[in-house]
Image (tube, helix red, strand yellow):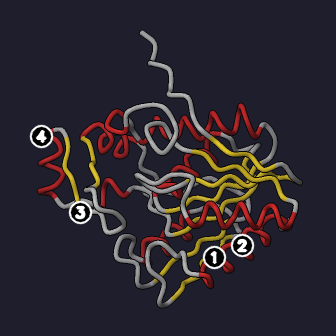
Amino acid sequence: MTDAPRPALAFHLTQGAGPMVVFLPGYASDMEGTKALALEAWAKDTGRAFLRFDYGGCGRSEGDFADQTLAGWRDDVLAMLDEVVRGPAVLVGSSMGGWLMLLAALARPEQVRALVGIAPAPDFTDWGFSTDEKMAMLRDGQIARANPYGPEPTPYTAHFWQSGEANRLMFGPIAFAGPVRLLQGMADRDVPWQRTQRLAELIGSADVQLTLVKDGNHRLSRPADLRLLARTVEEVLVAP
């Protein structure tokens, strides 16, 4: 028995000098977010190659959101690397996208040259839900949480949670050797900054830097945050 094919993915490619910068959105987000569009504008201004895309079931991509899993979205990232990027890439992952960038880097170590995480949330299926929520997902198939960024509640399914648990990373060293930059708000209510500090310790590269923004929230989408993000991406692009 073979797995069902992944949904067709919508993407937007900016041609330019490589390595190609690839933006990975967070959970239930899409390629039209503030950070993705700000990086695209930076790429056009600086002549850099840039890719933004929607995971299966998100934004303009095909598929039903309720059918998606973390492993499926990881496979979407790998499909973009294999079929669109093809050459060296720098991955920029926001929140859950920071988990996916790590999984993709482990799967394509020769292709992924550097990582930039924005409030990265690896293993959030473990620490981001209460015991009652986990039990409710397993009992009812899904839960819904109030969405602070929109009017509709955000669903989380049991099969997404189970896929996340099967792909946890922060139980030991993470074997990535390239430059890594982690941006984290200390006022983030979704990802505690101490978890990002621990992630910096676990990544095997000797070139890992963590930048803490004392008044920064989870989104890190203010003008100053976006300028910091662009500077950080520029830095890893020229790192040896």
Residue 230 bears which disc, if any?
2
Q: Quadrant of the C terminus?
A: bottom right
Query: Mark 1 or mark 3, which is nearer the start of the sequence?
Result: 3
**Amino acid type indicated by mark 1:** Leu
Check disc 1: other Cα within 10 Å, few if <14, some if 14-19, many if 20+: some
Q: Residue 140 falls in which quadrant of the image? A: top left
User: Which residue bears the numbered disc 1?
Assistant: 226
Task: Give the image quarter of residue 167.
Answer: top left
Mark drawn on residue 214: none
Amino acid at dot 4: Asp
Q: Is residue 69 left or right of residue 202?
A: left
The answer to whether 114 is drawn above or below residue 109 in the figure is below
Determine the secondary structure under disc 3: loop
Camera-near label (3 vs 2) is 3
Q: Identify the residue under disc 3.
A: 146
Identify the secondary structure beneath mark 4: helix
Residue 173 vs residue 198, the one in the foreground: 198
**Upstream in sequence: badge 1 or badge 4:** 4
Where residue 147 appears, x then y in whole percent?
29, 63
Q: CA distance from mark 4 to mark 3?
A: 18 Å
As drawn, is 25 to the left or to the right of 171? right
Q: Position of residue 25 (x, y in %)?
A: 53, 55
Q: Position of residue 196 (x, y in %)?
A: 48, 71
Q: Residues within 10 Å of mark 2 (few under 14, many from 20)?
A: some
Give the image location of residue 34, x and y in percent.
56, 66
Q: CA distance from mark 3 to mark 2?
A: 31 Å
The residue pinned by badge 4 equals: 140
Residue kind at label 2, given as amino acid type = Ala
* C-alpha span from label 1 to label 2: 6 Å
| Furthest residue in direction top, as rendered | 1
How far is disc 3 from disc 1 in space, using C-alphas? 26 Å
